[in-house]
C-alpha cells in the first residue's frame, strides 16, 4: 500500500494536517488498513523533503498544515494513471503451505484444504454480513448502487475487494482439490490397467476414485 | 423446540443395486431451524442435489428418515406428500422445471391455486413474488419468450410465493449475472429473516457467504461446516493484516 500516494491524493483535495489526513484515509477505506500517526508524519517529512508537499502555516491550534505542490499533483496523477504493479506476487503463505504439503508423505493435503476452506468461508460470511449492514446504513440497495455519500460507496468497494479475493481463494482451493482427485483417479486407473495386463478381472465394486481421497475430519 | 423445519436423520440414498450401485448420500444428519439460511457446497457428484430432492420429498431415502416440520415423510401417502410439498415447500430446480404453456405469473400462481388459494389472490401473490425477483413487467410472457436468467427468476418466484416455511434452491443463481444474483440472495436472505428455513446448493463461495451456515459435502457425506460467528471483532482481526 502506498501511504505516500494516498496522502498526496487527499492533499490534492485540500490542505490538511496529520490527524486530519489519517482520519480521512481511514474513513474512506473503512478503517481496513489502519495508519498510525507516526507513519503519517514520517511520510509527510519525506514528501516535504522531495518537494511534493509544503508546510502551509498552522490552523491556530498548533497543527501544522500541509499543502500539495505542483510536482506533488503530477506525482499523484501519475499514480492514478499507472496500474498497480503485480509483477512480484506477494508471499502467499497458503500457497506455500499447500505446495509443501503436496510434497510431504505424512501430510493429509485434503484435510489442509478443507480446514482452510472452512476458515475462508467463515471470513466470507463475516465480510458479506458486514457489507449488508454497510449497504443498509448507506441506504443503498445492494442490487442498485445508487449514489449516496461517496465515503460509504468507497467503504463498500473496499469490502467487495475483500469479498472477491476471499472468493478467489476458495475457488482456488476447490480447484486444487479437483486436481488432486483427478491425479488420484489416474493413479488408480494405472493400477487398474496393470491389473488388466495381468489378466485379472477388474473389481468394479471398489471404485478406485474414492479409495484414495480421505474425507477431512472435523 | 418446535422450530426445526427440516431434519435428516441418518439419511442414505443409493441409486441402483449391486456392483454398479452409487451411494449418493451416506448417513447424513442435518437439522435446519426456522430463520436459518444454509448453503450446501461440494464438488460435482458429491450428493448436493440428492440431498435437496430428499429434503423436498421428491425422492425417498434408501434408509433413514426425513422430517419436514416434524412430519416424517416416509410415512406419508403420495397425496399427503404432494399436499405437504405444495403447502410448505418451495423448490427451485436446477433446470427450472417450468410449464412452457403457461405465462410467468401463471407458473408462479399454479401451486397456490392447486392448494386451494382463490385465483385472484393467487395471482396477486404471484405478482408480488415476481416483483421481488425483479421481473414484474414480464408477468405475461411465456417461457419461450424469456432468457435463461429470466426463467430462473420465475422459478425462484414460484418457490417463494405465499409463505412457504421451507425453501430449497438448487444452484438458484447459476444463470444470473452477478448483480442479479446478489438481488436473489437478498430475497432468499429476507425469507430466512422472515422465519423460513432456506437451503441453497451453490458452488459459488461468494453466494454461500450470504448463509448463516455452510455445509460441505464430499462423496455423499457431510465433511465439515462453517458457521458465521456474528462477532464483529472477528471481522476486525481478520482485517488487521
Ligand atoms: N437418478 C440417478 N440415478 C443414478 N445415479 C444418480 C442419480 N442421481 C444422481 N446420481 C449419482 O449420485 C451421485 C450424486 O449426484 P448428485 O446428488 O446429483 O450430485 P451433485 O448435485 O452434488 O452434483 C453422483 O455420482 C450421481 O451420478
Ligand atoms: Mg446438482
Image (cartoon, rainbow, N blue to C red):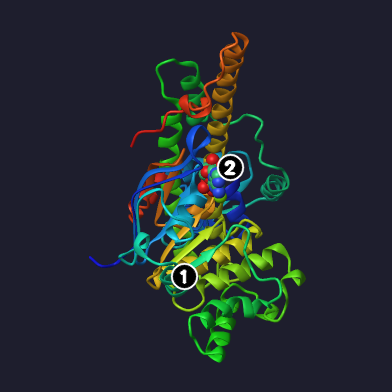
Q: Do labels 2 and 1 share a chain?
A: no
| Point 53% across, 55% down: residue | B207
Residue at disc 1, CB closer than 8 Å to ligand 1 = no
User: How far is disc 2 from disc 1 in space, using C-alphas?
Assistant: 73 Å
* Residue located farthest toward the top when viewing the structure as drawn: A198
Quarter of the rendering occupied by the C terminus of chain B:
top left
Residues packed near mark 1 inside 10 Å, few (<14), some (14 to 19) or many (20 plus) = some
Where's residue A79, x and y in %? Answer: 68, 45
Give the vertical position of A57 relative to A110 (above or below).
below
Label pair 2/1, CB-CB below 8 angstroms:
no
Question: Ligand 1 sits in which quadrant?
Answer: top right
Residue ID for mark 1: B82
Chain of the residue that carries numbered disc 1 in the rendered image: B
Where's residue B184, x and y in %? Answer: 56, 66
Q: Which of marks 2 and 1 is in front?
A: 1
* Residue located farthest toward the right when viewing the structure as drawn: B145
Residue ID for mark 2: A47
| Point 58% across, 55% down: residue | A10
**Left or right relative to A163: residue B147:** right
Which is nearer the eye, A204 or A129?
A: A204
Q: Say if residue B34 shows up in the picture.
A: yes
| Point 37% across, 52% down: residue | B228
Q: Say if residue A165 shows up in the picture.
A: no
| Point 77% across, 72% down: residue | B145
Residues packed near mark 2 inside 10 Å, few (<14), some (14 to 19) or many (20 plus) = many
Give the vertical position of B129 relative to B76 (above or below).
below
Quarter of the rendering occupied by the N terminus of chain B:
bottom left
Give the vertical position of A216 relative to A22 (above or below).
above
Amino acid at each position: 500500500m502506498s501511504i505516500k500516494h494516498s496522502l498526496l491524493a487527499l492533499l490534492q483535495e485540500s490542505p490538511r494536517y496529520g490527524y486530519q489526513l489519517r482520519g480521512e484515509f481511514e474513513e474512506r477505506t473503512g478503517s481496513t488498513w489502519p495508519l498510525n500517526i507516526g507513519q503519517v508524519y514520517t511520510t509527510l517529512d519525506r514528501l516535504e523533503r522531495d518537494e511534493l508537499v509544503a508546510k502551509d502555516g498552522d490552523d491556530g491550534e498548533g497543527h501544522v498544515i500541509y499543502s500539495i505542490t505542483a510536482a506533488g499533483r503530477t506525482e499523484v496523477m501519475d499514480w492514478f494513471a499507472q496500474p498497480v504493479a503485480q509483477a512480484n506476487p506477494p508471499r502467499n503463505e497458503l500457497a506455500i503451505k499447500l505446495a509443501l504439503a503436496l510434497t510431504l508423505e505424512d501430510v493429509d493435503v485434503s484435510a489442509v484444504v478443507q480446514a482452510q476452506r472452512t476458515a475462508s468461508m467463515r471470513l466470507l460470511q463475516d465480510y458479506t454480513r458486514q457489507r449488508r449492514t454497510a449497504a443498509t446504513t448507506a441506504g443503498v440497495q445492494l442490487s442498485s448502487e445508487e449514489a449516496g455519500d461517496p465515503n460509504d460507496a468507497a467503504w463498500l468497494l473496499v469490502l467487495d475487494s475483500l469479498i472477491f479475493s476471499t472468493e478467489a481463494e476458495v475457488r482456488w482451493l476447490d480447484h486444487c482439490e479437483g486436481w488432486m482427485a483427478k491425479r488420484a483417479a489416474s493413479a488408480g486407473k494405472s493400477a487398474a490397467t496393470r491389473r488388466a495386463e495381468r489378466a485379472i478381472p477388474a473389481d468394479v465394486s471398489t471404485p478406485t476414485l474414492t479409495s484414495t481421497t480421505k474425507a477431512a475430519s472435523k | 423446540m418446535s422450530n426445526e423445519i427440516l431434519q435428516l436423520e441418518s439419511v442414505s440414498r443409493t441409486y441402483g443395486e449391486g456392483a454398479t450401485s452409487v451411494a449418493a448420500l451416506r448417513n447424513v444428519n442435518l437439522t435446519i431451524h426456522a430463520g436459518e439460511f444454509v448453503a450446501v457446497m461440494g464438488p460435482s457428484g458429491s450428493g448436493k442435489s440428492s440431498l435437496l430432492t430428499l429434503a423436498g420429498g421428491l425422492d425417498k431415502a434408501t434408509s433413514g428418515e426425513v422430517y419436514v416440520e416434524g412430519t416424517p415423510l416416509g410415512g406419508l401417502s403420495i397425496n399427503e406428500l404432494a399436499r405437504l410439498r405444495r403447502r410448505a415447500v418451495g423448490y427451485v430446480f436446477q433446470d427450472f422445471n417450468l410449464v412452457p404453456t403457461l405465462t410467468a405469473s401463471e407458473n408462479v400462481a399454479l401451486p397456490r391455486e392447486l392448494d386451494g388459494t382463490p385465483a385472484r389472490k393467487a395471482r396477486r401473490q404471484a405478482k408480488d413474488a415476481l416483483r421481488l425477483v425483479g421481473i414484474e413487467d414480464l408477468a405475461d410472457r411465456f417461457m419461450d419468450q424469456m432468457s435463461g436468467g429470466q426463467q430462473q427468476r420465475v422459478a425462484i418466484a414460484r418457490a417463494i410465493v405465499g409463505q412457504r416455511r421451507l425453501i430449497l434452491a438448487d444452484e438458484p443463481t447459476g444463470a444470473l449475472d452477478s448483480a442479479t444474483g446478489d438481488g436473489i440472495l437478498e430475497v432468499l436472505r429476507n425469507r430466512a429473516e422472515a422465519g423460513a428455513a432456506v437451503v441453497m446448493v451453490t458452488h459459488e463461495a461468494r453466494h454461500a457467504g450470504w448463509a448463516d451456515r455452510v455445509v460441505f459435502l464430499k462423496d455423499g457425506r457431510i465433511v465439515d461446516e462453517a458457521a458465521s460467528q456474528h462477532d464483529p471483532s472477528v471481522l476486525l482481526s481478520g482485517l488487521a493484516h
